[in-house]
Amino acid sequence: MVKVIMSGCAGRMGRVITQLALEDSGIEIAAGVDVVSAADLGYPVFTSFADCDVQADVIIDFSSPKAFDAMISYAQEKGLAAVVCTTGLEQAQLEQLEAAAEKIAVLRSANMSVGINLLMNLLQKAAPVLAQAGFDIEIVEQHHNRKKDAPSGTAIALADCINEAMDGKYSYTYDRTPLYEQRRENEIGISSVRGGTIVGVHDVLFAGTDEVIELKHTAYSRAIFGKGAIAAAKYLQGKAAGFYHMSDVIEG
């Protein structure tokens, strides 16, 4: 049985994972941490990590960049593995995460779904072939109207995996409004849409002469992210310090 501290337990994803954990005999949420008090989750909830005195194996973090520093410090202090799903982290926080991986097992993913991680694998194979054939690359992501960060962490991760396959030759363009110039050759355009209750849509377009290839992932429920986070927590239990990825979880 993997015992979890749910960081951001009162949020949408925290509640989704709470429900999924009730249906999974291999995992138990031992406690939650959230600035919003929540007494209806079935486990003790603390408003800060400093107050949390519950023993656990792993932290699942679906909170916010503001809560990240306290979470990762607590994980290192208690020797807990950390599944970090929070997006919008600053560069200094990403460096802090890399340093933490020298002491504890860390898995960070901007998107926990199996489908998105398979899409990344496909993009790394497609990009070198299509780029050499002169295809331009654009990414369009869509999310609900309450999402604060833009572009999404997943959109950046998709662009990064393409760029990795292309030896880092691409730059990213997030907003063409202030530009009055034609599209540059080695760039990836990334556009954001916010509206309604869209869970998540990521569309990668390879636009060539007289043809377009489109690779698209649509999330219809947040449960896919929760299931991925739970699978990652199970995978990290007992793992040595280091930086792990969803590809490790998928490959077993």
Image (cartoon, helix red, strand yellow):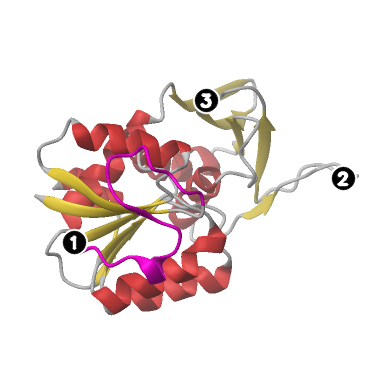
Identify residue for label 3. 213
Q: Secondary structure at mark 2?
A: loop
The stretch drawn in magenta includes residue 48 = yes
Q: Could you tell me the amino acid type at mark 1?
A: Asp
Per the model, the C-alpha gap separating discs 3 and 2 is 24 Å
Per the model, the C-alpha gap separating discs 3 and 1 is 43 Å
State which quadrant residue 33 falls in. bottom left
Q: Residues within 10 Å of mark 1 (few under 14, many from 20)?
A: many
Q: Could you tell me the amino acid type at mark 3?
A: Ile
Question: In the displayed image of the protein, which residue is found farthest to the front?
Answer: 39
Q: Could you tell me the amino acid type at mark 2?
A: Glu
Identify the residue at image location x=67%, y=42%. Answer: 189
Q: Residue 207 bears which disc, if any?
A: none
Q: Which secondary structure is most common in the magenta stretch? A: loop
Q: Are marks 3 and 2 in contact (CB under 8 Å)?
A: no
Q: Are marks 1 and 2 in contact (CB under 8 Å)?
A: no
Residue 118 percent coordinates (x, y)? 32, 37
Q: Secondary structure at mark 1?
A: loop
- Which of disc 2 and disc 1 is earlier in sequence? 1
Q: Residue 181 bears which disc, if any?
A: 2
Identify residue for label 1. 57
